[in-house]
Amino acid sequence: MTGRFISLEGGEGAGKSTQAARLAAALAARGIDALVTREPGGSEGAEAIRALLMQGSVTRWSPHSEALLFAAARADHVEKRIRPAIGAGTWVICDRFIDSSRAYQGVAGGIDDAAVLALHAFGSRGLLPDRTFVLEVPADQGRARAEVRDGAAADRFAARGDAFHADVAAAFRRFAAQEPERVRLIDASGTPDAVTAALLFELSDLLP
């Protein structure tokens, strides 16, 4: 039995980590084994690269350098954790995946989408999630949540300006319009229970 691969995307403070854990618990209640992981990170090698990517000044890496680092981290993550888990019948729930690279380094960073996908095709053999959920919240709500979460320790991406994050949000909406079977928009401005219910509804066609 092959597992499923689910990714959660969205801007800063959208609640991806919270909903990844809640979705895993909801699946477990239905007798489905689920692994929660994250990007960048999720494997030993990818976590080492995460430290390089998330720390330091906003200008520490160019978008092209970031794209290469993310692709390397993702390749290790896919090889060491994601593919083995799916092959063993486990559902994998990942906090961010390739669509974040397409939005952050691609659209907002000015790199052609085809180039980002080419890196993904080489490093991770083009693996795509069975379903991608984009959690959407108003910009001010997301910013407030991120400030509570991070305090004064905002990472290199959360610390970027409003125009950058608006470009990221627009990119995710574009992906949803282009790939409606895979990418679904979720209103994440409500209660955690309401958001989890919306995720499960949009996942119903994949549930056994």
Image (cartoon, rainbow, N blue to C red):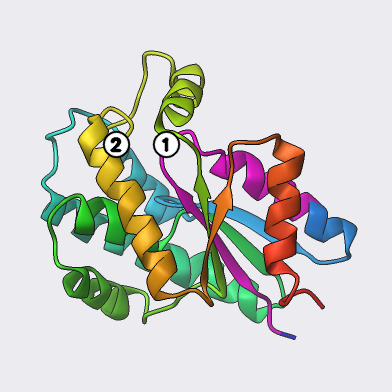
**Could you tell me which residue is drawn at 33 percent across and 31 percent down?**
158
**Could you tell me which residue is drawn at 59 percent across and 36 percent down?**
189
CA gap, disc 1 and disc 2: 8 Å
**Could you tell me which residue is drawn at 29 percent across and 39 percent down?**
165
**Of marks 1 and 2, the one in the foreground:** 1
Q: Which residue is mark 1?
A: 12
In this view of the protein, which residue sits in the foreground, 109 or 93?
109
Q: Is residue 195 above or below residue 92?
A: above
Magenta range is 2-25
**Could you tell me which residue is drawn at 81 percent across and 67 percent down?**
32
Q: Where residue 110 appears, x then y in whole percent?
A: 12, 56
Residues at discs 1 and 2 in contact (Cβ within 8 Å): yes
Q: Is residue 137 above or below residue 101?
A: above
Q: Secondary structure at mark 2?
A: loop
Task: Pick the quarter of the image with the N terminus.
Answer: bottom right
Q: Residue furthest top?
A: 152
Q: Where residue 75 appears, x then y in whole percent?
A: 36, 68
Q: Which residue is mark 2?
A: 157
Asked which quadrant contains residue 171, the reply is bottom left
Question: In this rendering, would 194 be left or right of 125?
Answer: right
Q: Is residue 124 above or below residue 109?
A: below
